[in-house]
Image: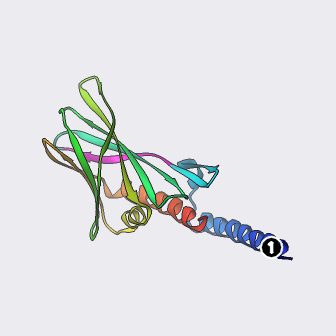
């Protein structure tokens, strides 16, 4: 009897999820499946939001590309980023800044290499899932600030690029929340 109730609850949840996906795709008209991957793990689901670019500092001609990894068994998001700059830098931490919020994290080095005349810095940071969700749901253009021994680097993104990026990422984060 209890097993039948669990099966019914599972079936209802799956039907609700499918209906929600159909409603989301018709409301927003975007196919988000090409922007992330997911895989079932032993203790949850692993989501990977594919690399996104657009944050730049035009004054020093530097830019940042990031990707997001999240496992439903944790409450933290792994925010990996590649930063490209002509100057040698020693990164310390990163901050995601929006109109009313600022979320900071230590930047852990993965590797540093050169590509032609640029330095390629690959780092990883951790943020709470709720904070990443807030960051992508805030109005206005955000900025990413890198704190280095050589000084602060402020990276901005164009409004048009951010609207598209945040729209897709918000949908993926909503999908993740509904599947937890």
Q: In percent of the image, x 55 and y 62: which residue is there?
A: 176
- Comparing 73 with 178, the one in front is 73
85 lies above or below 94: above
Q: Whole-percent x and y of residue 122?
A: 34, 37
Q: Whole-percent x and y of residue 119?
A: 26, 30
Which element is circle 1 on?
A: helix
Looking at the figure, which quarter contains the N terminus? bottom right
Q: Is residue 11 left or right of residue 165?
A: right
- Comparing 36 with 112, the one in front is 112
Q: Which residue is mark 1?
A: 8
Q: Whole-percent x and y of residue 58?
A: 20, 44
**Magenta stretch: residue 54 in it?**
yes
Residue that lies at the very extreme toward the left in this rendered image: 150
Residue that lies at the very extreme toward the top in this rendered image: 116
Q: In percent of the image, x 23 and y 25: which residue is there?
A: 117
Q: Is residue 154 left or right of residue 71?
A: left
**Magenta stretch: residue 89 in it?**
no
117 lies above or below 109: above
- Chief secondary structure of the magenta portion: strand
Count of numbered marks: 1
Give the extent of the magenta segment: 49-58
Q: Whole-percent x and y of residue 177?
A: 54, 66
158 lies above or below 100: above
Q: In percent of the image, x 57 and y 63: which residue is there?
A: 175
Looking at the figure, which quarter contains the C terminus? bottom right
Colouring convention used in this rendered image of the protein: rainbow
How would you rate the neighbour count of disc 1 (Cα within 10 Å): few for under 14, some for 14-19, many for 20 or more?
few
Q: In percent of the image, x 64 and y 51: which residue is there?
A: 42
């Amino acid at each position: 009897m209890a097993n039948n109730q669990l099966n019914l609850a599972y079936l209802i949840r799956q039907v609700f999820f499918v209906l929600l996906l159909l409603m989301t795709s018709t409301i927003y008209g975007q196919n988000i499946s090409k922007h992330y991957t997911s895989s079932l793990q032993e203790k949850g689901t692993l989501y990977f939001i594919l690399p996104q670019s657009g944050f730049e500092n035009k004054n020093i001609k530097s830019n940042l590309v990031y990707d997001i990894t999240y496992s439903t068994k944790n409450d933290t998001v792994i925010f990996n980023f590649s930063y490209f700059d002509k100057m040698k830098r020693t990164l310390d931490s990163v901050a995601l800044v929006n109109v009313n919020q600022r979320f900071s994290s230590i930047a852990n080095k993965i590797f540093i290499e050169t590509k032609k005349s640029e330095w390629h810095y690959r780092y990883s940071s951790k943020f709470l899932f709720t904070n990443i969700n807030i960051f992508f749901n805030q109005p206005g253009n955000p900025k990413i600030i890198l704190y280095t021994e050589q000084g602060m680097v402020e990276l901005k993104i164009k409004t048009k690029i951010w609207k598209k990026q945040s729209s897709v990422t918000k949908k993926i984060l909503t999908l993740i929340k509904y599947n937890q």
